[in-house]
Image (tube, rainbow, N blue to C red):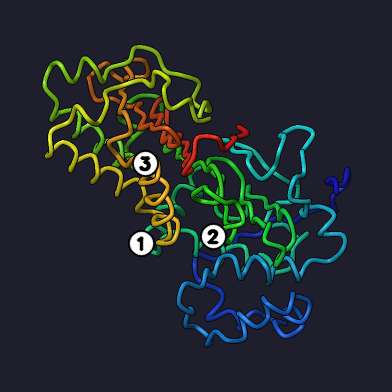
Amino acid sequence: MTTPNHIPAQSVVRLPRRGFLSGMAAVAGATTLLGSLPAAIRTTIAAQPVGVPAAGQKKAETLAQILHASLSSNQKEAVCFPWDYVHPKFGLLRTRVGNNWNATEPSVGSSFFTKDQQHMVREIFEHLIEPEWHARFDKQLEDDTGGFGHDQSIALIGEPGSGTFQFLLTGRHMTLRCDGDSAEHVAFGGPIFYGHDAGGFNEGPAHSGNVFWSQAVAANGVYKMMDGRQRGLAMVEKLPPENAVAFRDKKGDLPGIPVTEFSADQRAELQRVLAMLLEPFRTSDRDEARQCLEKQGGIESCRLAFYREGDLGNDGVWDCWRLEGPSLVWHYRGAPHVHVWVNIADTPTIATNS
């Protein structure tokens, strides 16, 4: 399938900042939609009480399956793709990550989608993000795009029930996924991106009100705990390309200080930073990320780098830093505003398309 050259005129609407569904069966027209899903999926959804998630049930994935079933043929032509679809501009779509891109042309808030479909997309988004972070992501979206639905687009890759299916949400400062574990060995369904431009191009305005700046403050706390020798190992002069998040060879020369050089209290503080990085995302994604990290040797297999380039104000508060392991990259670029690239797997052989 290819994206059509012409999409009907769109009237963008703002989607509400509240949950739309009280449960899987509360979708308008759900009986019709569920009837078009594979039998195994219908059985799973039917067995789940309204408003009460079944043990281990991933609501975002189930909603994505219902959304797929609700699409008309014209809508599917615009936003649905085979599992191994190679986009002429972006490459393999299911592994593409970017800081400002749209996987498809119609925006979520446009009249191309029905109100119920728009609300389902919002609900999927809310299930991918922890409730305590909804307001902060909404602030980011308001600052960067005018609110949820204005700039975001979706792609549905593969077929529900086939074992290879992914929901992809893209836009400025956003690449989020859910896959129901279709993409084996990777966390978050594949590489993701988040960021925020709170305004300004110096350390004050750029970080004032930035919903993700607390992560950098925590990372700088680890730097403050280091002695002179450790700081020398951790400091790197030049930033790499921020989208360079492909995994390197395990024996490669990763930048920064090996975590094995840390004392017990320093390692504990770095673990706290990692918990803060994972905090915005749903429990299942956090757990999968930690499982992937453990399979590559745990936090001890990683290095932590701080970059002199990009130090806004030349004040030694490091705006750019990177936690990297054999198959983990968490790249934080804080200058001139926050861009964060995340790629985590349990093996370094997984490819990334950025």
10 Å crowding of disc 3: few (<14), some (14-19), many (20+): many
Is tag 2's residue or tag 3's residue first in the polypeptide sequence?
2
Q: CA distance from mark 1 to mark 3?
A: 16 Å
Q: Residue at x 40, y 25 (%)?
A: 335
Residue at coordinates 50% horizontally, 30% vertically from top-left?
247
Query: Where is residue 286 drawn, in percent x and y?
Result: 40, 55
SS of the residue under disc 3: loop
Residue 199 seen from this side: no
How packed mark 2 is, by other alpha carbons closer than 10 Å (few <14, some 14-19, many 20 or more), is: some
Residue 195 % position (x, y):
46, 40
Please indicate whether residue 186 sits to the left or right of residue 293 in the image: right
Q: Which residue is mark 2?
A: 125
Q: Which of the image's four quarters has the C terminus?
A: top right
Would residue 279 appear left or right of 103 to someone viewing this image?
A: left
Identify the residue at horizontal 85%, vertical 49% (top origin): 1
| Residue 167 vertical position relative to residue 336 in the rendered view, above or below | below
59 versus 251 height, above or below: below
Would you place residue 295 above or below residue 132 in this image?
above
Query: Which of the two discs, 2 and 3, sits closer to the camera?
Result: 2
Q: Which residue is nearer to you in this view: 101 or 251?
A: 251
Residue 159 lies, in percent from the top left, at: 74, 61
Residue at x 73%, y 56% (from the top left corner): 158
Q: Which residue is mark 1?
A: 132
Disc on the earlier residue, 1 or 3: 1
Q: Position of residue 294 (x, y in %)?
A: 35, 46
Q: Quadrant of residue 47?
A: bottom right
Label placed on residue 210: 3
Q: Quadrant of residue 300?
A: top left
Look at discs 1 and 3 and give the one toward the viewer.
Answer: 1
